[in-house]
């Protein structure tokens, strides 16, 4: 999956009733370089992720927060495009002291999805709890358990976009590890022998939901990489009712242990 062509972007805007001003605003971000370069600090490690979806490197400011977001968006079919450090927006809210404050803020990503577009700000779960106390008018916990930023939502709505606060608590570390483990099967072609695929399919038809370890015990000569490649290509009929994210989240150990 590659980023949208200009014609595909035009069709996407038309299908989602995107106002001309918002379309032009998004197009400027699509054509521009990131607003700023990220830097490592004592509390975080920054870097770049080579995105096949975008055909370029995506910046991340934390390998345990923004990078997690990139991993999940790279594999999320609902995500069409993602732009790091897309632009600056000005927030207006009341500080804890009571005075009004209007800082400039650069969201972590602009994300284009099949039916929406908006800014996303990714934060460590622990820091959000602290920010809710130190900046109560900027970061607020929702009844559903998620987070929101009212000033971010207002600023984004002024240009026709949404604004989401994302927490590292949304994903289990093991899910991210398994996504990282499988990325080679997304980026590099893996040839699956017809006989090997047939062995896997026959086992799943006979024993739906069989574990990978039991499958390998039953077929000692079967390379486990065949299972991972079939999983990535969604060619495992016995697991058709389980999405890849759900399957990965449900593993009780790192997939690497099965190699």
Image (cartoon, rainbow, N blue to C red):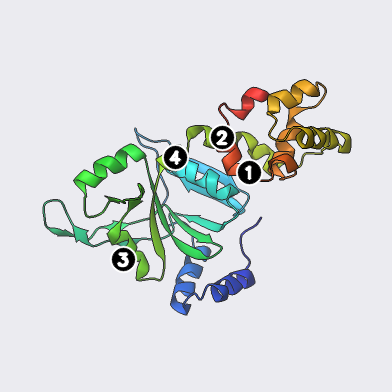
Among numbered discs 3 and 4, the one appearing first in the sequence:
4
Cα separation, mark 2 vs mark 1, equals 10 Å
Q: Would you say the residues marked 3 and 4 are in contact, meaning their CB atoms lie under 8 Å apart?
A: no
Among numbered discs 2 and 4, the one appearing first in the sequence:
4
Cα separation, mark 3 vs mark 4, equals 29 Å
- Observer-side mark, 3 or 4, equals 3
| Left or right: where 192 falls relative to 212 | right
Q: Would you say the residues marked 2 and 1 are in contact, meaning their CB atoms lie under 8 Å apart?
A: yes
Q: Circle 3 is placed at which residue position? A: 154
* Rendered-image quadrant of the N terminus: bottom right
The secondary element bearing badge 3 is classed as helix
Q: Circle 1 is placed at which residue position? A: 242
Q: Circle 4 is placed at which residue position? A: 46
Q: Circle 2 is placed at which residue position? A: 250
Among numbered discs 2 and 1, the one appearing first in the sequence:
1
The secondary element bearing badge 1 is classed as loop
| Left or right: where 95 falls relative to 221 | left
Residue 170 placed where, x, y %? 44, 43
The secondary element bearing badge 2 is classed as helix
Neighbor class of circle 4 (other Cα within 10 Å; few <14, some 14-19, many 20+) is some
The secondary element bearing badge 4 is classed as loop
């Amino acid at each position: 999956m590659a980023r949208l062509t200009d014609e595909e972007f035009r069709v996407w805007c038309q299908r989602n009733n995107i106002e001309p001003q918002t379309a032009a605003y998004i197009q400027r971000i699509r054509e521009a370089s990131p607003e700023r370069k990220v830097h490592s600090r004592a509390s975080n490690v920054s870097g770049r992720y080579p995105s096949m979806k975008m055909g370029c490197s995506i910046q991340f400011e934390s390998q345990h927060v923004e990078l997690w977001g990139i991993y999940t968006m790279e594999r999320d079919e609902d995500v069409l495009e993602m732009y790091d450090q897309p632009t600056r927006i000005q927030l207006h809210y009341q500080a804890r002291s009571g005075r009004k404050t209007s800082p400039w803020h650069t969201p972590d990503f602009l994300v284009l999805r099949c039916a929406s577009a908006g800014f996303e700000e990714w934060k460590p779960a622990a820091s959000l709890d602290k920010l809710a106390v130190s900046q109560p008018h900027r970061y607020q916990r929702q009844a559903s358990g998620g987070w929101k930023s009212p000033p971010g939502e207002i600023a984004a709505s002024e240009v026709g976009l949404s604004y989401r606060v994302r927490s590292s608590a949304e994903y289990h570390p093991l899910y991210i590890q398994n996504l990282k483990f499988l990325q080679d099967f997304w980026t590099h072609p893996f040839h699956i022998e017809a006989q090997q695929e047939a062995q896997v399919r026959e086992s799943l038809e006979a024993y739906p939901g069989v574990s990978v370890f039991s499958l390998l015990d039953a077929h000692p000569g079967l390379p486990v990489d065949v299972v991972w490649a079939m999983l990535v290509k969604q060619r495992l009929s016995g697991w058709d009712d389980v999405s890849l994210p759900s399957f990965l989240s449900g593993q009780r150990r790192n997939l690497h242990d099965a190699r």
